[in-house]
Image (cartoon, rainbow, N blue to C red):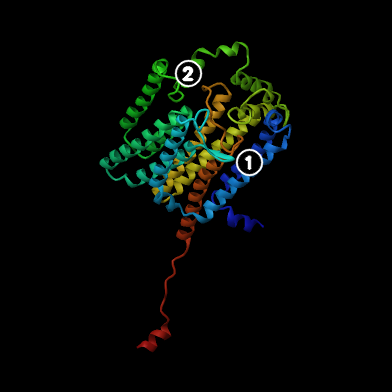
Amino acid sequence: MNQTIAKYFKGDKVIWIVLMLLSLLSLLIVYSATGALAYREKSGNTMYYLIRQLFTIGAGIGVIVFMVNVIPVKMYSMVANLLLYGSILLLLMAMALKFAGVIRGTGRTIPLGPLSFQPAEVAKIALIIFTAKVLSRKQKTTHDLKVAFLKIMTGTAVVCGIVLMSNFSTSALIFITIITMMFVGRIPIRYMLLVFAAGVGLVVLIYFTADLLPEKIGRIHTIKGRIERFIHGDPNSEKGITQADYAKLAIYSGGIIGKGPGQSDVSNYMAAAYNDFIFSIIVEEYGLIGGIAVLFLYLVLFFRGIIIVRRSRRTFPAFVVIGLTVVLVYQAMINMGVSSGVLPVTGQPLPWVSLGGTSLLFTAIAFGCILSVSHLNQVDQEQQEQPVQVNIPDEDEEMKKQ
């Protein structure tokens, strides 16, 4: 049985353990946090969202197993440019549908009948793979690094610029991830400092010019509003009715050991208890100990990613693991920071834990790439350890030839 499991669940065993623990936590906390949602949307059928999450996680694990066993890592490099161009087209399509009135709300998603997906999730992975490809091929000279920087920043500017119109936090997450990859890829610090300064300047520009722009231009006014609420406080906090207030209440009421599984009260009042603020519900039910345990799991993922990178003998797979590991960990830290009030309110789910559909499947693709590189490292190591066979001529055969 163990051999059968190992045959399909290839790659770093520790990451697989982290993935399974996060899956178990996801099912427990989603079932608890979607009670009120079930009564509003599904006539009180509290099992609906549990079954949906179970199915989605199962499909995600299937995607990971398929990627590790079927798709070679070099394939990602071959399709990197195509993925980036395709993701940009999807982002432009979503923007066009938003302005045409086909998509309501923020314009983040493209509807596909009963399903929908966010093009930004595709662009996030595509840009990371593209950046890994460029960095892996431009490492020999200073001129190579400059060319790599210009190529990467061109793609990043296009992707982040389009995503910014509908989702500031995702745009910032992608931007910080790419900066981290370039730092590891030996891009000169002065280049990245200029880019980082330009990013900060853009945020400042948005803040001071938002009132001069019409409401229809993306979510510029939302960005300014969130910055103001974070700096000056939310006026609604005086009434204690904001989601950030509920999150703080959940963390406070959880204490050290928590109320116990399924005993959350705050989730009944929070609109995003099962998604953007799910970490606060985890702390409410499992206490500070449970919150630290979740943080520990993501830190384990981070350090295992470092180990995979150090064992990799090829630059492209190493950069892919760096980018995907960092983006998952950064996203988790943002979710935890928002829930605890350390960061401004954003819309980043807790990876592999929050209630999700297609977004969780894209997270599965990220895990699939990481585990595929880990498995490739194991294959390379086994090939190196195989003894070299030297054919020693038989003495009798030599005599016969003479």
Q: Nearer the viewer, residue 304 or 265?
A: 265
Question: Type of residue at label 2?
Answer: Ile
Q: Which mark is residue 150?
A: none
Q: How many marks?
A: 2
- Residue 354 in which image quadrant: top right
In percent of width and height, residue 242 lies at: 60, 18
Q: Residue at x 43, y 24 (%)?
A: 217
First in sequence, mark 2 or 1: give its number.
1
Q: Quadrant of the C terminus?
A: bottom left
Q: Which residue is mark 1?
A: 23
Q: Is residue 356 left or right of residue 141?
A: right
**Residue under the image location 41 percent in, 79 percent down:** 393
Q: Nearer the viewer, residue 114 or 18?
A: 114
Viewer-side residue, 147 vs 12: 147
Q: Residues within 10 Å of mark 1 (few under 14, many from 20)?
A: some
Q: Residue 92, position in %: x, y? A: 42, 36
Regarding mark 1 in the picture, which secondary structure is present there? helix
Residue located 36% across and 37% down the image: 155
Q: Which mark is nearer the camera, 2 or 1?
A: 2
Find the residue positioned furthest to the left: 143
Crowd around label 2: few <14 · some 14–19 · many ≥20 (10 Å): some
Check if mark 2's residue and mark 1's residue have beta carbons within 8 Å. no
The answer to which quarter of the image holds residue 216 is top left
Q: Give the CA separation, mark 2 to mark 1.
A: 33 Å
Residue closest to the eye, 380 or 228: 228
Query: In the rendered view, would you say 100 is above or below 87?
Result: above
| Quadrant where the N terminus is found in the figure | bottom right
Tag 2's secondary structure?
Answer: helix
What residue is disc 2 on? 227
Amino acid type for the residue under numbered disc 1: Ser
Q: Position of residue 327 (x, y in %)?
A: 48, 36
Q: Position of residue 4 (x, y in %)?
A: 63, 58
